[in-house]
Image (cartoon, coloured by chain):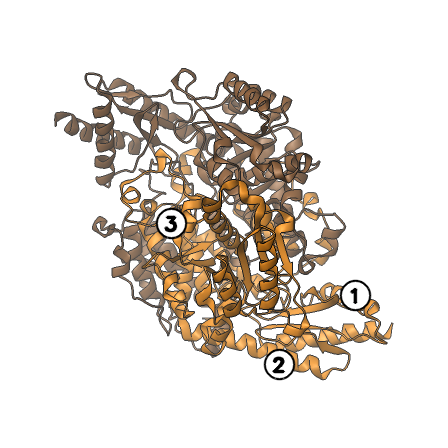
Chain colours: A brown, B orange
Amino acid sequence: MDIEWLISLLIITKPSKLSLSLAKFRSLSFPCEHLFDVGFNVFVIILLVYLNNVDIDLSLRQPGYLHNLLPDSAPDHPETVEQVLDDVKTKILPGLTHWQSPTFFAYYPSNSSVAGFLGEMLSAGLGIVGFSWVTSPAATELEMIVLDWLAKLLNLPEQFLSKGNGGGVIQGSASEAILVAMIGARDKVLRRVGKNALGKLVVYSSDQTHSALRKACQIAGIHPENCKVLKADSSTNYALRPELLQEAVSKDLEAGSIPFFLCGNVGTTSSTAVDPLAALGKIAKSNEIWFHVDAAYAGSACICPEYRQYIDGVETADSFNMNAHKWFLTNFDCSLLWVKDQYALTEALSTNPEYLKNKASQANLVVDYKDWQIPLGRRFRSLKLWMVLRLYGAETLKNYIRNHIKLAKDLEQLVSQDPNFEVVTPRIFSLVCFRIVPVDNDEKKCNDRNRNLLDAVNSSGKLFLSHTALSGKIVLRCAIGAPLTEEKHVKEAWKVIQEEASYLLRK
Amino acid sequence: MDIEWLISLLIITKPSKLSLSLAKFRSLSFPCEHLFDVGFNVFVIILLVYLNNVDIDLSLRQPGYLHNLLPDSAPDHPETVEQVLDDVKTKILPGLTHWQSPTFFAYYPSNSSVAGFLGEMLSAGLGIVGFSWVTSPAATELEMIVLDWLAKLLNLPEQFLSKGNGGGVIQGSASEAILVAMIGARDKVLRRVGKNALGKLVVYSSDQTHSALRKACQIAGIHPENCKVLKADSSTNYALRPELLQEAVSKDLEAGSIPFFLCGNVGTTSSTAVDPLAALGKIAKSNEIWFHVDAAYAGSACICPEYRQYIDGVETADSFNMNAHKWFLTNFDCSLLWVKDQYALTEALSTNPEYLKNKASQANLVVDYKDWQIPLGRRFRSLKLWMVLRLYGAETLKNYIRNHIKLAKDLEQLVSQDPNFEVVTPRIFSLVCFRIVPVDNDEKKCNDRNRNLLDAVNSSGKLFLSHTALSGKIVLRCAIGAPLTEEKHVKEAWKVIQEEASYLLRK
């Protein structure tokens, strides 16, 4: 089927008016003959974006631009779907940062796919809210099954599977996964030592850990000075040294503090550093510290046998997190959290008001995911992950990951061949960290130059990068992982970077 | 256009195989010629559900049923979309609780609509992650604009609009809204009195408040004994009496505790009780207590001038929450939170790692919603609310609400005419609380009978109710508000309830 032809056909097909009278309202509110018409038009917009056929007016991207383009208040009467979709095209699309573009290399990817999209459609269309088993048994059960599937693909230890005391759950984000694990760990230790000891609880991580950990500490009431941030440097490629942890724990114990939570990383946000899980886990275990492993981005790669080594030692963890919405073709949000002790979560997060009581829950026959998360309500998110796994299959997903890693290897090669640039830390997965090298050892000027390079590259509108700082060096990050990225996009991106750099270096 | 015809046409249209080779993968991963085919089939499933053309095998709804129907591990190779959608029809749909069914009267509604669905489609298709302004300016700006629109429809005080220090933000759920408000309030007071005073902080609410408040206290580290639950009874229709609050606050102040958070309700979950906001707010203000108003369900009704009175006094609140995903035709999740002091949130929830820094944020030119919420990542949820407001218009939405309230009034009338039943609290919005009346003043037997009635009605598969307890009485809740519910559905539901009751009363 020819896409161009389809699009012109669809554009000609005028959608029916959505102007509503109350009398017609009920039949329109869901099963409606217009759904197909209008759905088509939405498809067209999505396709237009992905075929890059939309003229993007970058001048619109000024703070407050949209306030000047939309009215001050909601309309009293219905507008037509053409009016709304026209505004989407002319006012909304130009103000988007196109995360699905093949030349989006910033942050980490946030994958969409046909399977993930269909899962979202189904979930939105069915419109169930699965907070307790009884509010949609299939939603809870599919989530348990699919999380078991993925645990097996990752070769996680059996204690993380749903058949015993453990199990997996879909959170909205890695931030929520860390928070939920921390609250479970916090309340477990406070039940032992008394709730007034909160001020003595200590959290450990390397300084490369995602800011989500600090935020979780803030929310959970851990005192800021008890968030021990241990220095990691280039000597370990920014992995946490177990000796540093042991030292810090011993010192805190001596001072009467209570070490209770350790966050280990597999693939940090700055540079994909991988902490030595087994050694860290051993220290955690012998000190009764909850060990959370954050593999939000890199976890996906560990379904490939050749990358599984990076989570070796996960058997010592109490909780493990990977974001299927990053690099696993599952639309945001879908953050997977596994725990060995589900009761640590449910004892901290359960509520049981009369209006939510039901026989299945009271007989303890079922899992009620409301008690494994912060919110009460929850969408049917396992559908999309299930559809991704079934419609693509594990082998295709492994090859998908491998292809991105290969593209990153190629880029690493290109960077290291250019004397104006250096690869700052060895590439492990699909992120390349690089910078313009300093001239005359002037690191300050070098940082400014790399900041300027970032601005120049992103202002070109041709690609989008982000940056970080490693040991004081400003570093550009090129994260390969958008579903549409091919070799040509990476090569073109590198050409733009080189051109902008040579212009800056001439200044 | 004839729906039956469309469906048969679509069923005949076989979708193309989704079997993938890696070579084809990239072109398939988003803009793909199959999207239309497969999208059609998903539409068909959704329509089938809503036209009730699916045979639901209720016997499948046993704990663990799905484990027996699905394989133990993910497939290595792609399955076809027919296989997956067939499983959706035969294994998933029978295990759903149909929240969008016109005879779903349990909990509170969770509205879907064509406009909300299209918004979800667009959001999933565009696949952006709008945590900072720069990661998609349109997403942040549309959210500010649409929340301003709704604040104006609700006639909220100007301080809640985005032009000053206040503003609105979309949270995932009312639970997160309460938690975010509480963390903001907690840290504001702790900055004044020192972080070691956490154990002295006191939260107030009536005993009718949603369990989300207790959960927020648990997460925020508020000591359980400092969550003061004030008794509300039938004398005030379960509204909190200001004198009780004043008394509790005075007592706590005398004891050296620090009152810091009050949750007022507009439309409680049990019985739609409405607390006297103005009187409560006055007490809160004179004691420097953060006043949060939870109008998760009933807030929607307050866009109608005749129901706006129920949030009179909201000008004394520090934060106000209403769920557009309950009774406002916007697909879950879309919980709207307004605050007067955005800095209370951002000072508590901000993180600013190097890898997220950007010029617009650092120049303080923009709102970064990541600092107004628990997670970092966020979907483009304002799109669906914007489409609901534009495609239906405020007048249609008001009439939508009024129609449900009229249906509830009719049911209230029917209940009160039947000597076997009583309406337990006066209906205010679209929830009717009723029960079989006790015989010989035997309240225990009466409670058992009402529990049995609930089981019998829900086991019939014809409708779905939930229950609560009010002053020790087991009460059935009939919450009218599903988009497809019409007069005939309410009448039929009442007939089923009467029949089951008369059968129970004969026993």
Of marks 1 and 3, which one's residue comes earlier in the chain?
3
In this rendering, the answer to whether B112 lies above or below A226 is: below
**Badges 2 and 3, same chain:** yes
Q: Residue at x 22, y 40 (%)?
A: A459
Q: Nearer the viewer, residue A276 or A399?
A: A276
- Which residue is denoted by mark 1 in the rendering? B452
* Residue position marked by numbered label 2 in the rendering: B410
Q: Are marks 2 and 3 in contact (CB under 8 Å)?
A: no
Q: Report whether B181 appears left or right of B386.
A: right
Judge depth for marks 2 and 3 and give the one in front. Answer: 2
Secondary structure at badge 1 equals: helix
Q: Earlier in the sequence, mark 2 or mark 3?
A: 3
Label 1 CA crowd tier, 10 Å (few <14, some 14–19, many 20+): some
Name the side, left or right, on which A453 lies relative to B265.
Answer: left
Secondary structure of residue under mark 2: helix
Three-letter residue code for mark 2? Asp
Q: Which mark is residue B126?
A: 3
Residue B353: x, y in percent?
38, 35
C-alpha span from label 1 to label 2: 25 Å
